[in-house]
């Protein structure tokens, strides 16, 4: 359950730390792409929601703005330690030479992963039903689950709102929350954005805006 202890743990986890300049992050990324394209397992390729600031000409692979949202999306191969190697142009050309639609494969991979493990925690209301989900999944792809259409339909129908306050944490909550429930949802989003190592946005969004891949 997502109670006060977990809220405190989240805030400690996201406490601001010095970040490397984006130029250094990109250099590290390039170093990680030196493996031959054929060595990367496309079965572990996923779309990744990342900061809009990374949408720049020197990004060494496919990247684009995510619809009309203040985020970018790129693609990355995950290893067992949840370290991500972002897809390079050489990797995508290799898959295309084999007649593989790597974008579709990545989305299929994400959909399966997300349906098997959709969220990390819940907060239930007085009626015993969840009103809030935390997407702080241990695979570090919690926010990317928002790309999967109707993933939370069974719990919320189409009556919910989503947010990505921190790069590794997404939040999903029912609409029209009141009282303590609204306080918990707003506190979680606002504080994770405020104290996050890699804050993304304190905005709330209609989930359908993410269903564009």
Image (cartoon, rainbow, N blue to C red):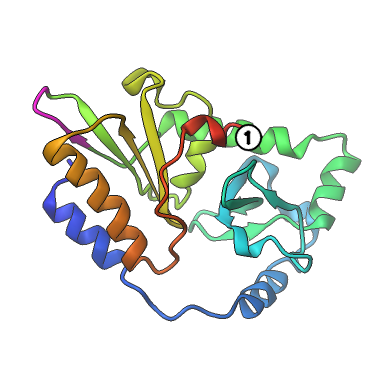
Vertical order, 30 against 121 (above or below):
below
Nearest the eye: 182 or 58: 182
Is 27 left or right of 208, judged from the image as shown? right
Residue at image point 40% right, 39% down: 162
Q: How many marks?
A: 1
- Place residue 102 in its image quadrant: top right
Q: Residue at x 61, y 64 (%)?
A: 53
Horizontal and vertical percent position of residue 57: 78, 65
The question of residue 192 being in magenta is answered with no
Above or below 14: residue 169: above
Magenta highlight: main SS: loop
Asked if 198 appears above or below 146 in the picture, the reply is below
Q: Please, which residue is most extreme toward the right here?
A: 97
Decide if residue 77 is on the left or right side of residue 19. Answer: right
Q: Position of residue 83 (x, y in %)?
A: 53, 60
Left or right: residue 202 versus residue 121 is right
Q: Which residue is mark 1?
A: 107
28 or 83, which lies in front?
Answer: 28
Q: Position of residue 139 (x, y in %)?
A: 44, 49
Q: Quadrant of residue 51?
A: bottom right
Q: Measured along the vertical axis of the image, is residue 26 above or below residue 64?
A: below
- What range of the chain is rendered magenta? 123-127
Tag 1, which secondary structure? Answer: helix
Identify the image quadrant of the N terminus: top left
Label 1 Cα neighbours within 10 Å, binned few <14 / some 14-19 / many ≥20: some
The C terminus: image quadrant:
top right
Location of residue 189 in the rendering, given as x and y in whole percent from the top left corner: 31, 51
In this view, the residue in front, 110 or 167, is: 167
């Amino acid at each position: 359950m997502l109670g006060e202890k977990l809220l405190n743990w989240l805030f400690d986890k996201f406490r601001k730390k010095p970040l490397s300049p984006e130029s250094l992050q990109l250099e590290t990324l390039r170093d990680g792409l030196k493996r031959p394209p054929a060595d990367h397992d496309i079965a572990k390729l996923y779309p990744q929601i990342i900061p809009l600031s990374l949408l720049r000409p020197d990004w060494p692979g496919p990247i684009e703005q995510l619809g009309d949202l203040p985020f970018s999306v790129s693609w990355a191969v995950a290893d067992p330690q949840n370290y991500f190697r972002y897809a390079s142009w050489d990797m995508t050309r290799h898959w295309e030479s084999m007649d593989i639609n790597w974008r579709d494969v990545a989305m299929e991979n994400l959909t399966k992963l997300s349906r098997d493990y959709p969220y990390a925690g819940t907060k239930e209301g007085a009626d015993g039903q969840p009103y809030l989900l935390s997407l702080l999944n241990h695979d570090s792809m919690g926010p990317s689950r928002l790309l999967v259409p109707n993933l939370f339909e069974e719990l919320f129908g189409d009556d919910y709102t989503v947010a990505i306050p921190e790069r590794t944490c997404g939040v999903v909550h029912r609409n029209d929350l009141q009282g303590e429930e609204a306080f918990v949802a707003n506190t979680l989003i606002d504080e994770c954005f405020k104290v996050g190592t890699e804050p993304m946005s304190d905005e709330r969004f209609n989930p359908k805006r993410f269903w564009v891949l």
